Image (cartoon, helix red, strand yellow):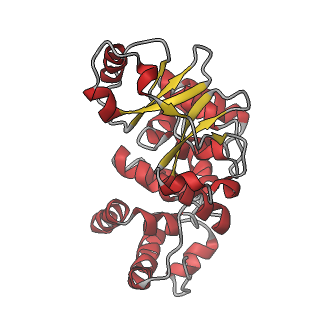
Amino acid sequence: MTDGLGLVLGFLEHDPGGAARVLEDRPAAHVAALLRRTAPVTAGRLLAHMVPRQAARVMEEFPPDQMAGYLRPLAADEAAAILGHLSAEARRPALSAMARGRARACRTLLRYRDDEVGAWMKVDVMSCPDDITAGEALRRLRREDGSVMSHIYVVFRDGRLRGAVEAGALLRADRKTPVLSLAAGARGALQARAPLTSVSGHQAWVLHDQLPVVDRRGRLMGVLRHVDLRRGLLRLQAGEAEEETTDVFLAITESYATGMSELLGMLLPGTARDRGARSGEHRHVR
């Protein structure tokens, strides 16, 4: 049985997408028992591949501090998608157990529906007021924990978006240059409440791989990356967290996933149906 557990843990680590498809069909309590035996990073990758509703059911098996720990490796939008399927009674203490900045990012994302731009934006973007110099903007950039950013967004003091400065231009500029003189206009800004489907054909995607997101007053809320736009559209179309592929790789791993499902059934005994599956009935896992 120890060897079997090792195989399952290896499956979780090396093919989290395939493992997620298998585990989504298991009782939440059994999946939680398995997560307790995995490394936090592996558990986080698995949760990121699961349908958010199913991942939330698993998270409900843990106390708030452990829930926050399992969600820590996930991107803020991935964590928020799972938190959005928790009851308010479970969500509040989970958010309270998170680091302050992380909780604030998740709360911001939770304001939006899954089909809105705001649900898919990244909220940890660098911005600076329009009345400082390039040198002051650089100092702020260096305080951002080593984050790599292609643009620094320039805002009015009330947070309304005014423009954006390329990081390269900021580095080349004289330190006393007003940052506003380096900023290009805020063309291509997306409304946070706009339907995700309505922005997929925006002309600005031709030139940029991310666009700023603003609220109805024009205040900067975050950025939408094109990769997250595609991911969101796929989820809306398919109704699940990850794109289901039909290529040769999936055909090969399907039989492997089925074998892992049977092994999981032995390690995590569940319903009578599961016991029947182990005695000879084969379940088709997707």
Could you tell whether 36 is left or right of 193 in the image?
Answer: left
Q: Nearer the viewer, residue 181 or 35?
A: 181
Quadrant in the rendering for residue 63? top right
Decide which of 41, 136 is in the foreground and name it. Answer: 136
Where is residue 54 drawn, in percent x and y?
Answer: 61, 56
- Residue 83: percent from the left, percent from the top? 62, 41
- Asked if residue 147 can be seen in this view, the reply is no
Residue at 58% of width from left, 46% of height from top? Answer: 120
Instruction: Judge by depth and name the residue closer to the eye, 128 or 144.
Output: 128
Q: Position of residue 4 (x, y in %)?
A: 32, 68
Query: Is residue 70 left or right of 90 when viewed as pictured?
Result: left
> Is 278 placed above or below 164 here?
below
The residue drawn where x is 49% and y is 63% is 20
So how many labels did they put on this image?
0
Q: Quadrant of the N terminus?
A: bottom left
- The front one of 56 and 75 is 75
Q: Measuring 65% from the left and 28% from the top, which residue is drawn there?
A: 92
Can you say whether 271 is above or below 92 in the image? below
Quadrant where the image shows the C terminus: bottom right
Identity of the residue drawn at 32% across and 32% down: 169
Task: Tell me if I can see residue 33 in this picture.
Answer: yes
Picture coordinates of residue 162, whole percent (x, y): 56, 26
Q: Is residue 263 left or right of residue 98?
A: left
